[in-house]
Amino acid sequence: MREAIEISHVGFDADNLENHAVCVTNFDFDAVDEALGFIHQAPPPVREQAAELFRALASWCFRGNRPLRCGMVKFVAIVAGLRPEILQDRSGQDLSTELGITKQALTHQSLRFADAWGFHFARSRSKEGRERMAAARRGGPNRNLGANKKKAQNEATRSHHAA
C-alpha cells in the first residue's frame, strides 16, 4: 500500500505513465524577497561586485563538463567553511554522509578552495600547519590502524617484551 503524499509536496509528470506523482520541494519565497530587499538597498557598484563574486564562485564550483553533484559538493564545502551556521553547524562527517562522499573528499574540496582563493577557514588548519603535520608523520609510526589498532598494540608489546 502506498503512503499518503502531502498535496503540497507533489507534482505530476504527464510523461511518466507509470507514476504520475513526483516529489517537489518547498521554496521559501519570503526569504528570497527579503534577500532581494537587501540587494536592492545596496548601491549599484556593490551589487555589481557581489554579482561578479557570485559568478566567480559559481564558475569555480561548476566549471568543466562534470555532473552537478560535483559542483554541489564544492559549494557545500565553501558554505561550510565560510558560514557554517547556514548548514546548522553540522560537522564535516555529517555533511559528507548526507552528500554520499567521504569526509576526506569534502575536506579536499575545502582545501582546494582555500588554497585557490587565499582563504583560511576557521575550522581548518593553515597550509603551514598541514605541511608540518605531514612532515611529522613521514617516517613515524603508523597510527592509522583502524579496527586492527588493539591487535597491533598487543603485537608491539609482545615484541618489546621478547627483546
Image (cartoon, rainbow, N blue to C red):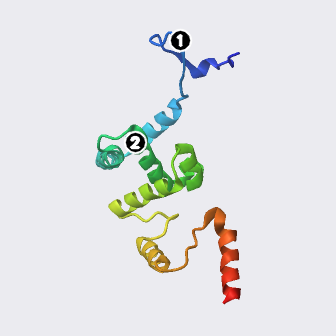
Q: Position of residue 6 (x, y in %)?
A: 64, 20
Spot occupied by residue 153 in the image (x, y as percentages of width and height)? 67, 75
Residue at 47% across, 10% down: 14
Frontmost residue, 151 versus 100: 151
> Looking at the picture, does residue 3 appear above or below residue 110?
above
Image quarter where the C terminus lies is bottom right
Query: Which residue corresponds to the image point at 55% horizontal and 49% vertical from the top-left?
Result: 95
Amino acid tagged 2: Ile
The answer to whether one can see residue 90 in this image is no
Kind of residue sitting beneath label 1: Glu
Q: How far is mark 2 from mark 1, CA to CA?
A: 44 Å
The local secondary structure at tag 2 comes to helix
Residue nearest the observer in this picture, 52 or 60: 60
Residue tagged by mark 1?
18
Q: Please tell me which residue lies in front, 27 or 98.
A: 98
Q: What residue sits right under mark 2 in the picture?
A: 39
Q: Is residue 50 visible?
A: yes
Q: Quadrant of residue 109?
A: bottom left
Position in image of residue 149 (x %, y %):
65, 69
Does residue 8 lie above or below 146 as drawn? above
Of marks 2 and 1, which one's residue comes earlier in the chain? 1
**Percent position of residue 105, x then y:** 47, 54
Residue occupying image coordinates x 60% and y 49%? 88
Q: Is residue 41 above or below residue 22?
A: below
Q: Is residue 154 left or right of residue 37?
A: right
